[in-house]
Image (cartoon, coloured by chain):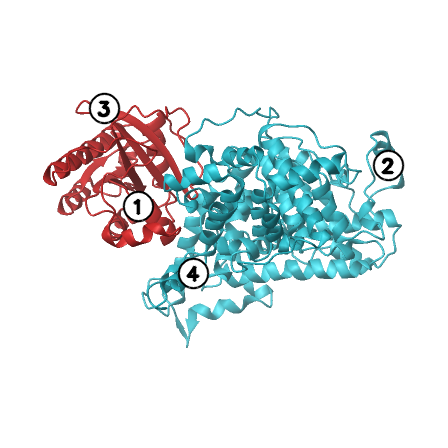
Chain colours: A red, B cyan
């Protein structure tokens, strides 16, 4: 589960929760392990339930800690879904450039984000397995166009070769940082929240969820 | 029978030399299910952990008895063998019927990516059996369906959807316990895929969900380890078995048939062996694995339900009531684990989780769905399963009584749970001593460790004192002890307590909850029991 090599002291200024979504077998867990531990495993087990990892990096001179949530590609259970998306400020929708179906599912994942995640969530579309360009089934231009139309960030990356993996996460985190800075400026909400615990949501929970916070259920 | 007298003597001499019990417990006239359950609970799991794969001889036999696919009374030597062979034959025939039901394409050919009872050059010779009824399916009113016809009634559409489902299953089967070379074997993978697919088709409300593949994989490995290949012994003849040829495990003689047709009354020793060969016959490995999996899923299936949310919003003005309706059983279990059990045994940890707004399903789903195989080393998880299966039927009231008893949580209880939760909380994990036994590199090597004559050893002896261990190993042993201790509590009859029966239904899930909740109580009982 967790990133055991991680330092759990609070030497960061911002903590962003990011979720990984996409069909099963597109390489979500390997993108995560490549980004957080620089590891890749061709034979990784399928994810069951939810797993996490973190990495702290610097953006505009600020220490930003990315807390990344990874889940089973087949997971469609609402009770998990809502817990999964709650408080997320960024999302990576991953597809496999070799598998048309996984690309076709992107709009469904997008819909799910619209339904469950914060409206301000920053979304990036990532075509994984770019090292297998010769077997490609999804043209780059097509995906790029789709991303533009839906205001998504876009990259093609390879968890195996590590091409663009850091870049895609950096790009997402930077956009989140800018979005939140702007948001705070707009709303004149000055005192940026101090890190005080393992999970901090920098965006308010959606209105409809507020009533549920008191119950033990999602 | 197949063994000569000298071979038998030789074997018995070796058993005595090694001071191992003979495989005679199963024909003890007084042997009961309770005795066998005791085997798991008294020793905190069956046998001793020998290697990383937790190899324990005859574990699969115990599991089959615990879970009810094998009736212990039928194995007794006093019971006519025909009862055993008939019930085994029925179960195995049912599995073959399932394969025929779901694996024959509309044009009568066998699904090439699955196992099949009668394969001739990849096509199923349906006409040679009475089951070839599906052959006509692609021909309706004299019109043969074109596989490319997109009409909804075209049987090919269903067929292609099922092929897609198998593709999904494949993706997980290929990623099953990648550390264990056994699961790279193409035959093993094919069996896993076939059994999962058949279960999914027979349980269309749940169908296949990720995680089931690991439950099945454990069963497969455990059963395969015990499976016996009669071919390694001198065969008397090579009459055909009920099931035709076996492409992978070429065995010439059917113990079932020979037993039925011979009608011989062999000496009890050989008779016992016959029973063993019937029950553990490798040719029916897949059939028996399926049987066990189905039984396990009678309990575990609901942990994979995912469609309950569709009810949401449609009924009930009473919102709390609505919540109960829409809440899946796995969520209820997770909430119970954190909100009730954890809160009682470790309020501090519970408070930490609550403060951090960590919902129980975030960590609990994985615990439950794959029954701790990702939380514990493989061998330890198997020991835990021993206990969960063994005490399945006794567990009905245990959780409640255990909870009632739990008035004095100790640091130790919290530690055990913290061990599990450390990752969620970001605590550095304990250093565990890693077993160094090499894992067999392929199926044949794996099997070669289990010669047919190896059955019945070692696991039936008087309970030796449990090995002292640390980390996961001792924790697992502790779980077994607790389960046992709570069983004793129930026998006292004084602590029954019923509530929340919708959460706490019967079976494995109760064992599971009990393991979390009864730790402090167990420790008291355990130590008084030991001294």
- Please tell me which residue lies in front, A144 or B44: B44
- Please tell me which residue lies in front, B192 or B242: B192
Whether labels 1 and 4 share one chain: no
Which residue is the site of mark 4?
B324
Q: Residues within 10 Å of mark 4 (few under 14, many from 20)?
A: few
- Please tell me which residue lies in front, B58 or A209: A209
Q: Chain of mark 3?
A: A
Which numbered mark, 1 or 4, is in the foreground of this view? 4
Quarter of the picture holding the C terminus of chain B: top right
N-terminal of the pair, mark 2 or mark 4, is: 2
Which residue is the site of mark 3?
A58
Whether labels 2 and 1 share one chain: no
3D distance between C-alphas at marks 3 and 2: 71 Å
3D distance between C-alphas at marks 3 and 1: 24 Å
Left or right: residue B235 versus residue B395 is right
Which residue is the site of mark 1?
A85
Q: Residues within 10 Å of mark 1 (few under 14, many from 20)?
A: many
Asked if the residues shown at circle 3 and circle 1 are in contact, with their CB atoms under 8 angstroms apart, the answer is no
């Amino acid at each position: 589960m967790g990133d055991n090599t991680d330092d759990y002291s609070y030497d960061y200024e911002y903590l962003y929760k990011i979720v990984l979504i996409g069909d099963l077998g597109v390489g979500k867990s390997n993108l995560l392990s490549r980004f957080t531990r620089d590891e890749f495993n061709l034979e990784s087990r399928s994810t069951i339930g939810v797993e996490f990892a973190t990495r702290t990096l610097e953006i505009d001179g600020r220490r930003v800690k990315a807390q990344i949530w990874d889940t089973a590609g087949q997971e469609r259970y609402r009770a998990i879904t809502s817990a999964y998306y709650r408080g997320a400020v960024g999302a990576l929708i991953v597809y496999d450039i070799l598998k048309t179906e996984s690309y076709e599912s992107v709009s469904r994942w997008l819909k799910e984000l619209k339904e469950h995640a914060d409206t301000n969530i920053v979304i990036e579309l990532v075509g994984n397995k770019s090292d297998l360009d010769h077997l490609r089934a999804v043209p780059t231009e097509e995906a790029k166009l789709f991303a533009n139309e839906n205001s998504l960030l876009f990259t093609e990356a390879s968890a195996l070769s590590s091409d663009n993996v850091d870049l895609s996460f950096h790009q997402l985190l930077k956009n989140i940082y800018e979005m939140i800075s702007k948001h705070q400026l707009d709303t004149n909400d000055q005192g940026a929240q101090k890190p005080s615990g393992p999970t901090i949501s920098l965006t308010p929970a959606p209105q409809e969820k507020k009533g549920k916070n008191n119950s033990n259920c999602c | 029978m197949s063994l000569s007298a000298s071979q038998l003597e030789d074997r018995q001499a070796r058993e005595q030399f090694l001071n191992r019990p003979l495989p005679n417990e199963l024909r003890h006239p007084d042997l009961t299910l309770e005795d066998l359950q005791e085997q798991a609970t008294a020793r905190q799991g069956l046998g001793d952990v020998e290697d990383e794969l937790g190899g324990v001889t005859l574990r699969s036999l115990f599991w089959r008895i615990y879970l009810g696919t094998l009736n212990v009374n039928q194995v007794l030597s006093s019971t006519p063998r025909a009862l055993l062979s008939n019930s085994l034959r029925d179960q195995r025939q049912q599995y073959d019927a399932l394969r025929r039901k779901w694996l024959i394409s509309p044009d009568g050919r066998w699904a090439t990516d699955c196992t099949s009872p009668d394969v001739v050059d990849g096509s199923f010779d349906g006409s040679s059996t009475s089951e070839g009824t599906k052959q006509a399916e692609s021909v309706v009113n004299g019109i043969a369906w074109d596989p490319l016809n997109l009409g909804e009634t075209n049987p090919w559409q269903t067929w292609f959807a099922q092929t897609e489902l198998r593709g999904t299953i494949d993706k997980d089967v290929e990623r099953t316990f990648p550390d264990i070379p056994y699961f790279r074997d193409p035959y093993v993978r094919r069996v896993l895929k076939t059994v999962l697919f058949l279960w999914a088709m027979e349980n269309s409300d749940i169908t296949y969900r990720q995680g089931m593949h690991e439950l099945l994989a454990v069963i497969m490995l455990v059963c395969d380890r015990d499976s016996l290949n009669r071919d390694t012994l001198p065969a008397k003849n090579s009459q055909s078995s009920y099931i035709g040829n076996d492409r992978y495990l070429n065995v010439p003689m059917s113990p079932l048939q020979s037993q039925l047709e011979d009608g011989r009354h062999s000496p009890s020793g050989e008779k016992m062996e016959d029973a063993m060969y019937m029950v553990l016959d490798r040719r029916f490995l897949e059939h028996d694995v399926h049987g066990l999996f189905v039984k396990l899923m009678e309990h575990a299936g609901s942990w994979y339900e995912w469609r309950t949310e569709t009810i949401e919003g449609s009924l009930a003005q009473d919102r709390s009531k609505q919540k109960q309706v829409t809440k899946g059983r796995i969520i209820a279990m997770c909430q119970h684990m954190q909100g009730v059990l954890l809160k009682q045994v470790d309020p501090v940890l519970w408070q930490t989780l609550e403060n951090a707004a960590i919902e129980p399903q975030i960590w609990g789903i994985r615990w439950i769905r794959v029954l701790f195989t990702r939380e514990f080393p493989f061998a330890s998880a198997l020991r835990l399963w021993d206990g969960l299966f063994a005490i399945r039927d006794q567990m009905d009231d245990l959780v409640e009584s255990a909870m009632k008893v739990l008035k004095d949580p100790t640091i130790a209880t919290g530690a055990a749970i913290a061990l599990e939760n450390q990752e969620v909380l970001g605590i550095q994990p304990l250093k565990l001593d890693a077993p160094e036994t090499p894992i067999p590199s392929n199926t044949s090597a794996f099997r070669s460790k289990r010669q047919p004559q190896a059955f019945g050893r070692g696991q039936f002896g008087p309970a030796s004192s449990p090995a002292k261990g640390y980390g996961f190993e001792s924790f697992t042993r502790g779980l077994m002890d607790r389960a046992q201790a709570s069983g004793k509590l129930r026998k006292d009859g004084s602590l029954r307590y019923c509530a929340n029966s919708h959460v706490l239904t019967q079976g494995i899930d109760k064992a599971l909850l009990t393991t979390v909740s009864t730790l402090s109580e167990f420790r008291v009982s355990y130590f008084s029991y030991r001294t």
